[in-house]
């Protein structure tokens, strides 16, 4: 045996033992489908620094957890290269693809994700339409035209360290989405030259949805993708905004569609809900937004003398009257309750009246005095009923108080009488 050959054998034995140790210490090195060691991980770990970063990042990764490894994405031969010859492992002839350019990334991921036969082996219910949808998005269209600054799969999911979408650590987990989109959309240098504002994330954070999602942790509130789509990220477009909002605000959407604004807004190309509420910085609506007061939005488009103006005034008056009736009944019932009177029925009626008030604010979107009337009438009936119960309870309280006062007077007179009697008896005894 020549010296060179001996050296080679020793080197190989060393490699195998190092390989064995790293296989033991690193779960990734164990291909789930075979027990064979993995040269990609072994060598990259050895070299360390940047080349080892993917290994660390992949410790909690949706791909690794299904037994996929470097070679499944990058290709190559994970059984070669233990002799420290990386070209044997990273060999194009053995299917090594290397690192995709930004433009190639969607196809790189779609190789598996658009292949139903492949994906079904891992998860029978997973969808395989991400790439097709992505191609229809502004991001996808612009990438195809050669703009590599738009979002590709890795900008929203990562490459090493891709989490399942419902994992709170995922870049696409609801509360992380604004940050993920904001990495580009809030960066005015990065977005320079596109003519798109960079305020969306800041505006969203100030609006009702951002506060609900990010401050209250209410995951029923939309993140960017709920309105823009996951993979088909496009502005909803004027005609479809009502549908976007209507996914969650079904009643508002239906009432709007039954209102005279439906046709009028379509003709003027005004976006449905956005015209009054805006899209990102949605303020909490108030009753003063309807009507003819300073804060009303109706008077922006309807001037005095028009039907819109008159209707606005009536709608506001009806909602306001119901609100006042509830306030009045509520304060009276509260006094009776504090005095210990039984007013549970009034509390129920008030709760119903409040429900009507909430409904009336939704019903206002129909712009119909008659339809609003149905809701406020019901509410006023309940509020009046609570009011009557409150008044009756306070009357009863007065009556009881009078009764108490009367009996106190009676007791006092009696006590005085007894006292006088005792004195009289005492005097007689003295004599
Ligand atoms: C014997 C050591 C060794 C082995 C085995 C090895 N690599 Fe590498 N790898 C390297 C070195 C060194 C570099 C950096 C120099 C280069 O790009 O060739 C690198 C770079 C890479 C890169 C980045 C290339 C780029 O263009 O930036 C990828 C991707 C990669 N390796 C994947 C793999 C995969 C997949 C395997 C297993 C099939 C593998 N490597 C096996 C040593 C190795
Ligand atoms: C889910 C597919 C996938 C898997 C699995 C994967 N990579 Fe990558 N890798 C990519 C993509 C995509 C890029 C390009 C990233 C980019 O452009 O931001 C990349 C880039 C790289 C690079 C270039 C430097 C960098 O980090 O961008 C190296 C080196 C690399 N991968 C090594 C590995 C190693 C080693 C493994 C196994 C531990 C591995 N990759 C597993 C998809 C994958
Ligand atoms: C602009 C950001 C963005 C881009 C670009 C993007 N995704 Fe997604 N992706 C998402 C969001 C958001 C979700 C859904 C998260 C959820 O359901 O909560 C998602 C979900 C997924 C899922 C889970 C299954 C599903 O469809 O709901 C897969 C798989 C996926 N994306 C792969 C890809 C691939 C492959 C690409 C590139 C072709 C890509 N994504 C591009 C944002 C993006
Ligand atoms: C070699 C095939 C393959 C490639 C290439 C690949 N994936 Fe995957 N991916 C899978 C498999 C298999 C799963 C697990 C399926 C599952 O559990 O739903 C998965 C899961 C995912 C998930 C989690 C889906 C969920 O259920 O929450 C996301 C997100 C994802 N991949 C994104 C990507 C991105 C981004 C790329 C490109 C950088 C990519 N994948 C490349 C095969 C691949
Ligand atoms: C890697 C950077 C990047 C990320 C991350 C990103 N985008 Fe974009 N996006 C862009 C760029 C650049 C454009 C401009 C394309 C153009 O109009 O030419 C764009 C365009 C858009 C547009 C179209 C704007 C218009 O009026 O033309 C929408 C909508 C959009 N992105 C939404 C999103 C959402 C939602 C997310 C997060 C889920 C997101 N983007 C994540 C870079 C990004
Ligand atoms: C409640 C729904 C909704 C949410 C949530 C939402 N958007 Fe929008 N977004 C819209 C509507 C509606 C438009 C306007 C479309 C139009 O007028 O054609 C829009 C427009 C855009 C545009 C185009 C440029 C502009 O400002 O008009 C971008 C980019 C954008 N949104 C990004 C985002 C990002 C990033 C987030 C998350 C922080 C987000 N959006 C959250 C509904 C939403
Ligand atoms: C994914 C579901 C979802 C979508 C889509 C959605 N919203 Fe919302 N919206 C909510 C939730 C949940 C709340 C309650 C937030 C809270 O706790 O205050 C809310 C609150 C509101 C409020 C405040 C209600 C109040 O009583 O304070 C307005 C106004 C509103 N949304 C308008 C819109 C508009 C306009 C759109 C479309 C551009 C839209 N929403 C899209 C779920 C959604
Ligand atoms: C962005 C402009 C705009 C805003 C804001 C607006 N409207 Fe209108 N409205 C219109 C247009 C346009 C029409 C159709 C032309 C017309 O009759 O004035 C219309 C029609 C109406 C009609 C039907 C009028 C008729 O002749 O039958 C009523 C009622 C109405 N609006 C009430 C309201 C109320 C109440 C508000 C406030 C909550 C409001 N509008 C806010 C633009 C607007
Ligand atoms: C003409 C202006 C206008 C349009 C268009 C409009 N709204 Fe409103 N919206 C209002 C006003 C004014 C209020 C406040 C009513 C109140 O508090 O008395 C309101 C209140 C709301 C509320 C809170 C009350 C409730 O119903 O829970 C939601 C949610 C809402 N709007 C969603 C929408 C959606 C979704 C659309 C589109 C389908 C839409 N709005 C279209 C003016 C409008």
Image: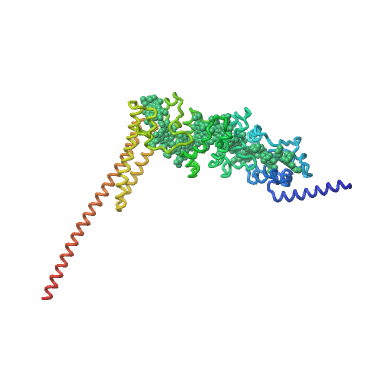
Query: Colour scheme in the image?
Result: rainbow
Horizontal relation, residue 389 to residue 106: left or right: left
Would you identify the image quadrant in which residue 411 lies? bottom left
- Residue 190: x %, y % from top left: 59, 34
Which quarter of the image is occupied by the C terminus? bottom left
- Residue 239: x %, y % from top left: 48, 27
Tell me if residue 278 can be seen: yes
Tell me if residue 246 can be seen: no
Horizontal relation, residue 312 to residue 173: left or right: left
Would you identify the image quadrant in which residue 144 lies? top right
Q: In the image, what residue occupies the spot 58% across and 41% down?
A: 171
Residue found at the far left of this picture: 431
Residue found at the far right of this picture: 1
- Nearer the observer, 225 or 118: 225
State ligand 1's quadrant: top right
Horizontal relation, residue 418 to residue 396: left or right: left
Q: In the image, what residue occupies the spot 36% across and 41% down?
A: 354
**Vertical position of residue 194 compared to residue 419: above or below:** above
Horizontal relation, residue 180 to residue 31: left or right: left
């Amino acid at each position: 045996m020549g010296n060179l050959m001996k050296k080679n054998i020793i080197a190989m034995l060393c490699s195998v033992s190092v390989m064995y140790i790293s296989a033991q210490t690193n779960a990734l090195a164990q291909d789930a489908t075979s027990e064979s060691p993995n040269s990609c991980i072994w060598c990259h770990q050895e070299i360390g620094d940047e080349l080892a970063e993917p290994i660390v990042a992949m410790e909690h990764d949706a791909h690794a957890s299904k037994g996929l490894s470097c070679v499944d994405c990058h290709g190559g031969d994970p059984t070669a290269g233990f002799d420290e010859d990386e070209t044997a492992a990273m060999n194009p002839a053995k299917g090594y693809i290397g690192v995709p350019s930004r433009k190639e990334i969607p196809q790189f991921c779609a190789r598996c994700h658009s292949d139903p036969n492949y994906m079904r082996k891992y998860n029978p219910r997973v969808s395989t339409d991400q790439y097709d949808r992505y191609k229809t998005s502004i991001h996808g269209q612009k990438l195809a035209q050669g703009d590599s600054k738009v979002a590709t799969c890795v900008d929203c999911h990562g490459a090493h360290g891709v989490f399942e979408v419902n994992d709170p650590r995922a870049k696409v987990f609801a509360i992380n989405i604004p940050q993920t989109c904001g990495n580009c959309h809030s960066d005015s240098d990065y977005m320079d030259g596109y003519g798109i504002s960079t305020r969306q994330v800041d505006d969203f954070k100030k609006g009702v949805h951002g506060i609900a999602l990010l401050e209250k942790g209410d995951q029923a509130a939309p993140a960017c993708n709920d309105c823009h789509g996951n993979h088909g990220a496009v502005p909803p477009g004027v005609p479809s905004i009502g549908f976007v909002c209507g996914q969650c605000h079904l009643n508002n959407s239906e009432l709007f569609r039954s209102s005279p604004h439906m046709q009028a807004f379509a003709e003027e190309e005004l976006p449905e809900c956005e015209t009054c509420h805006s899209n990102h910085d949605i303020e909490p609506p108030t009753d003063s937004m309807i009507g003819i007061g300073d804060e009303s939005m109706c008077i922006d488009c309807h001037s005095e003398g028009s039907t819109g103006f008159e209707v606005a005034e009536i709608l506001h008056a009806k909602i306001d009257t119901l609100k006042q009736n509830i306030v009045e009944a509520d304060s009276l019932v509260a006094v009776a309750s504090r005095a210990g009177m039984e007013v549970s029925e009034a509390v129920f009626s008030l709760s119903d009246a409040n429900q009507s008030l909430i409904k009336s604010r939704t019903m206002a979107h129909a712009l119909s005095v008659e339809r609003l009337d149905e809701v406020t009438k019901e509410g006023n009936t309940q509020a009046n009923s609570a009011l009557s119960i409150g008044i009756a309870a306070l009357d009863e309280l007065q009556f009881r108080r009078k009764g108490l006062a009367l009996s106190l007077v009676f007791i006092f007179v009696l006590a005085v009488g007894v006292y006088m009697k005792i004195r009289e008896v005492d005097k007689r005894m003295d004599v």
